Amino acid sequence: YTAKKGLIVNSGKIFDVSLFGGKVGVFNFQQSQTVWTNIAVSCANPESYGVSLLNSHLKLASLNQLNMTKNFVVSAWINTNVSGIVQPVFCTADNGVCLYLDEELKITATYGGTTVKHVTTINLGYWNLVAMRLNLQENRLSVFRDGVDETVELDKTKIVVNTSAILYLGSDTNQNFSGVVTDVRILSRLLSSDILTVLTLPSLSRQRKMGIVTLHLTFTNKSLQDSQSSVQVAESNTPSLVPVLVSGYLHSLRQKLSDLSRRKRSLSRIGGIKHIVTKLERKVSEGARSTSRARRRKRTTNLREEL
């Protein structure tokens, strides 16, 4: 900031739990003898809220309005202390599209009669990132828990989905989610295989410009609406907003995703090396067989000459 030109540099709000402090300054690019003054830096913990859905739910919109008629991704951070019952996270009233916790606390996804269940259970009393992805091009339905997915193949001949059905957050109109939900995201287009990296981004401004984001509910400023979306959320029984702190879990999840990404790259390199070794072994084997045949022909020729 300068008195003559006013504001020059403003990073805006940056929520990045991977940054643990350090020096703050301004870079000068080939500008010698530059003096900066009146640099103001503020750092405050943003107020984060989640919606308690114990006796209430949110009515989002129809699948058509949410652009969930083809490929889509839905995700949310969830926290519950209840087990032994079915707890819907995202569901239509007819259960044609549903992401829910089963009685064993395993996150499960259903689409048009096809169901996929995660093999692991969520942690009671902790924040868990859950997601569901539909890929009609590859006929796949996937469910995610903290960066790990389970995938099944869709049977297109059996898919029956009412795209006019309303999607609810925390309910299927018969049962409710017994806990707190925050950072709700609905993306109307397929992402890269590194889907969880996008789902843990603090901001989705770039994805909004790409037309990917249909709805993003962060409940900041104690609002139940997404100010940048045309979708209007309706509430039932006035759900309460409670302060939440997921940054610690988010940081540990990002570290886990980073480790998974490194492992995938290592496995990919190992797979490439194995492929090369296999090709070399095949060539050596073919060469050995050719040599063996040549030796047999030579022996046969020598025997004929002796006879």
Image: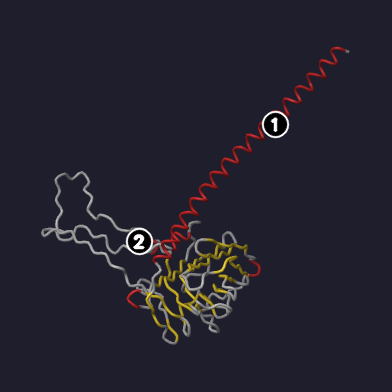
Q: Which residue is mark 2?
A: 16
Query: Which amino acid type is shown beneath numbered disc 1?
Result: Glu
Q: Where's the N terminus, which quadrant? A: bottom left
Disc 2 crowd rating (10 Å Cα; few below 14, some 14-19, many 20+) is few
The answer to whether residue 102 is above or below residue 134 is below
Mark 1 / mark 2, whichever is N-terminal: 2
Residue 38 in the image, given as x and y percentages of width and height: 15, 59
Q: Rounded to the nearest whole Å, what is the CA distance between mark 1 and mark 2?
A: 56 Å
Q: Nearer the viewer, mark 1 or mark 2?
A: 2
Q: Secondary structure at mark 1?
A: helix
Residue at 14% from the left image edge and 56% from the top image edge:
37
Name the image quarter holding residue 224. bottom left
Q: Where's the C terminus, which quadrant? A: top right
Name the image quarter holding residue 136. bottom right
Numbered badge on residue 110: none
Residue farthest toward the bottom in the current orientation of the protein: 237
Residue 299 in the image, given as x and y percentages of width and height: 80, 19
Query: Which amino acid type is shown beneath numbered disc 2?
Result: Asp
Residue at 30% from the left image edge and 58% from the top image edge:
21
Q: Which residue is mark 1?
A: 286
Residue at 78% from the left image edge and 19% from the top image edge:
298
Q: Secondary structure at mark 2?
A: loop
Residue farthest toward the left in the current orientation of the protein: 4
